[in-house]
Image: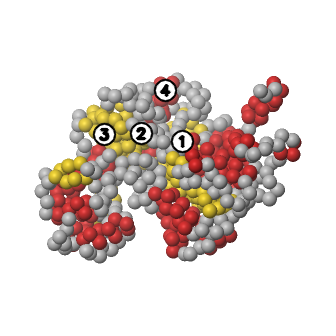
Amino acid sequence: MITENKLTSFKSLVQQSSREELIWLNGYLAGLLEQPQLQTNPSVFVDAPAVLPKPTIIYGTETGNSKKIATQLQAALKKVKISAKLFDASQYPVDKIEQEEFLVVVMSTQGEGEPPQSAAKFFQALLDRNFQLQKTQFSVFGLGDTAYPLFCQAATDMDKQLEKLGAKRAYPLQKADTDYTALSQTWIGEIVKLLTTQNIGSQLVVKQEKQNGLATSHKQNYVGQIKHKVILNDRDSNKQTYHIEIESNEKVVYACGDALGVYPKNDEETVRKIATFLGENLDKAIITNAQSRKLSEVLAEKSVRNLGKKTIEKLNTVLQTTIQGEKIDLLDVLPIIQKPDKLNSTDFLEIFSTITPRLYSIASSPEAHENEVHLTVGLHKFRTNEQEKIGLCSDFLANYPKNTKLEFYIHKNNNFRLPAEDKDVIMIGAGTGVAPFRGFLFQRDAENASGRNWLVFGEQHFTLDFYYQTEIQEFLAKGVLTKLSTAFSRDTKQKVYVQHRLKEEATTLYEWLQNGAYVYVCGQKNPMSIDVENTLVAIIAEKGKVSTEKAQEILAQWESEGRYLKDVY
């Protein structure tokens, strides 16, 4: 048993420690206990070995989660006096990789199991060049979504390639699902422990149960139906944005900040054109995954848009052709392809993966909308190769009939949660980025939260594109919404965006921040969220009378503490 005095001292230490310091303490104590003979004299309790390794942390991110974990690891190492270099993969000087002693990679996955665009050149360099990494130890942490068939594939490929180049795996590959916090914090503690209690350069021994770390998926599928659908824009708007209400007979368990996953399907015209190319009847029985299904059902679920290099290569092999391009849609190339005489339909279908689910921020509150989930869905229109196209899932939902069975699941996002009821909240959203904040306001209203709420919303036109205007005005009238700032970019000669409103309100914004307000950003990552972040840094620097570098550190610290949160895409 521990004495009362020691227990009091220990509790005091815990209460005074930051999250990163507690992570280090966990790793440090675990390292002590694994020693064959635990020494208890005072000389044991030193900050770290005299000669410390120089780790380098590289992250590849699409939405910012990999960067967040990498930054948390850097902060945890700093607490134990280990200075780790941190690089976005796009900025890392790959020619120096052979000099690395300890390399840590945090990598998300996109598309057909590929690394994020920012990490593509870095990964390609590892594939193309014969680096000698025998003096390097490494660990890879992967971020993904188990709803996708190629879960954490980029991290898996990175882990294998580093080993192939001679690097020694210091800690096994960790593959985290969307609710990654617990696994990432455990991993950070383990990396800190490795770097403070092991002799770098020796062969590290890792317990078998730590192999292939995987965050268990707890996704639950639901069945519901669309009970209400309305376009939020006025008639002359350039946008077509839908408010969609999904109702279920089951109790749908979610929290504000979560997203809803939808399984879209190809439309009938797409299915018919592919079947015509194959020369097959839509009712033909096809064996897939040891089950017999109609060809029409199989084609409806195949991913045939925005096909990447790997799929294009398979198409060229099976169709005996030479399709060119980085990304293609199958329907664009079928008219110019001569179908081989002996094309096997099953071989052709196996080229394509199943359509991956799409995620939409939930725009409702479980307290205010029982057994309902609301979405804000913008019909995605774009041009490619001189053709106008429409996004698969937004089109699927826009045309999905009401009162018809719809399968969905809840995508947990514990990194975008409301704070305690007495805390102030600043919500910055452009376009459909307002979705989670509608849910936030309904939730804060239902809870009678005492904290203040400030919404900064942007779109093109006040009269055409002010989503949820009536509800927002009601929240203002009731006092639920303390402050509203709007930016309608096409209503003035010079375009005004949400970051401009933040600049105009810099003094008030800084006062809220100094009072401990939580800042949320939702919407397009580029350029909106980047412009907003740069503006926040500028305001902190100006009003706080600190350098830009110091302001960036402050914002990064708030992000690490969960006071600055982003849900961007």
The circle drawn on residue 175 is none
- Residue 281, image x and y in percent? 12, 56
User: How far is mark 4 from mark 1, CA to CA?
Assistant: 22 Å
In which quadrant of the rendered view does residue 24 lie? top right
Check whether the beta carbons of the residues at disc 3 and disc 2 lie within 8 A of each other: no
Q: Which residue is mark 1?
A: 415
Q: Secondary structure at mark 2?
A: loop
Compared to residue 360, the image places residue 7 above or below, namely above
N-terminal of the two: label 1 or label 2? 2
The circle drawn on residue 219 is 2
- Residue 485, image x and y in percent? 51, 41
Q: Secondary structure at mark 4?
A: helix
N-terminal of the two: label 3 or label 2? 2
The circle drawn on residue 407 is 3
Check whether the beta carbons of the residues at disc 1 and disc 2 lie within 8 A of each other: no
Give the side of residue 389 with respect to residue 67, left or right: left
User: In what quadrant of the picture does the N terminus appear?
Assistant: top right
Camera-nearest residue between 119 and 33: 33
User: How far is mark 2 from mark 4, CA to CA?
Assistant: 28 Å
Please, what is the three-letter code of the amino acid marked with disc 4? Asp
In which quadrant of the rendered view does residue 170 lie? bottom right
User: How far is mark 1 from mark 3, CA to CA?
Assistant: 25 Å
User: How far is mark 3 from mark 4, CA to CA?
Assistant: 30 Å
Residue drawn at 28 percent across, 45 percent down: 398
N-terminal of the two: label 4 or label 1? 1
Pointer 3 local density, CA inside 10 Å: few below 14, some 14–19, many at least 20: some
N-terminal of the two: label 3 or label 4? 3
